[in-house]
Image (spheres, helix red, strand yellow):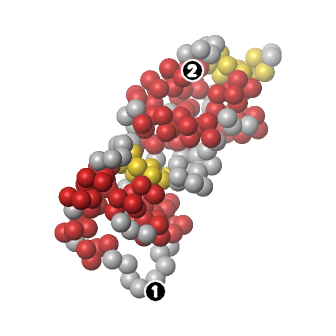
Amino acid sequence: MNAYIKELDRYGDILTKEQMRVVCHISKRKATYLLQSGLVPCINTGKKTHTYLIRKSDVKRYLKDRDEHPLRYQSIPGTVPDVKNAARRSCKYLSDIVSESQMREYYGDKLRPYPDVLSVPQIKLITGYGENTIRGWIDKGELRYLDAVAGWRIPKAWLIDFLCSDYCNKISRKTSRHLKYIEEMTATR
């Protein structure tokens, strides 16, 4: 196990699935199974590539537990795990790794150059989501707004509330800009 830990020390606090499988000397399929079944806690970013973010401490815990209880992690030959439902049940989200106050501080810094009240096109530039998606959030009541003559206006504080909300963090198909924000937040944690 010490060899695994030494290899693990080469990486940062957050690992991708590929880094985890290299450290643990397991196949991609086995790594996917461990993450989607909840045996190793993770964050599902919603991306097609680099889908999972795993804490280094969780990988260490897995390695130690795997040495002590190898049968717990042994798959039964010929079985294919219920990957879709396991992913929904067990993968963690950003709010499980970064606190709300850390998210608020991060977004406050990111939005500092922008005016205090934003238009939908400005929010599109900030988040990377389309205007129809943003209007959908407003229609659903997820993103609060002010009804002005020139169109909907969203105070910066309300946008930060939305970006820190569970609804926003559980969006399954995040834009590249949103994913970049998540990566920056978890890297500075």
Q: Which label number is shown at residue 187?
A: none
Q: Label 1 belongs to which residue?
A: 78
- Most distant residue in the right direction: 150
Location of residue 17 with respect to 142 vertically, above or below: below
**Upstream in sequence: badge 2 or badge 1:** 1
Residue at point 52%, 49% (across, down): 45
Where residue 25 sits, quadrant-wise, is bottom left
Quick one: 182 or 50, which is closer to the camera?
50
Q: Amino acid at mark 2?
A: Leu
Quick one: 111 or 153, which is closer to the camera?
111
Left or right of 90 on screen, residue 136: right
- Percent position of residue 8, x then y: 31, 52
Residue count near mark 2 (Cα–Cα under 10 Å), binned few <14, some 14–19, many ≥20: some
- Percent position of residue 4, x then y: 27, 59
Q: Label 2 belongs to which residue?
A: 111
Q: Amino acid at mark 1?
A: Gly
Residue count near mark 1 (Cα–Cα under 10 Å), binned few <14, some 14–19, many ≥20: few
Residue at point 59%, 14% (across, down): 113
Give the Cα distance between marks 2 and 1: 51 Å
Helix, strand or loop at disc 1? Answer: loop
Decide if residue 92 is in sight here.
Answer: no
- Percent position of residue 120, x then y: 73, 26
Left or right of 67 on screen, residue 175: right
Quarter of the image containing the N terminus? bottom left
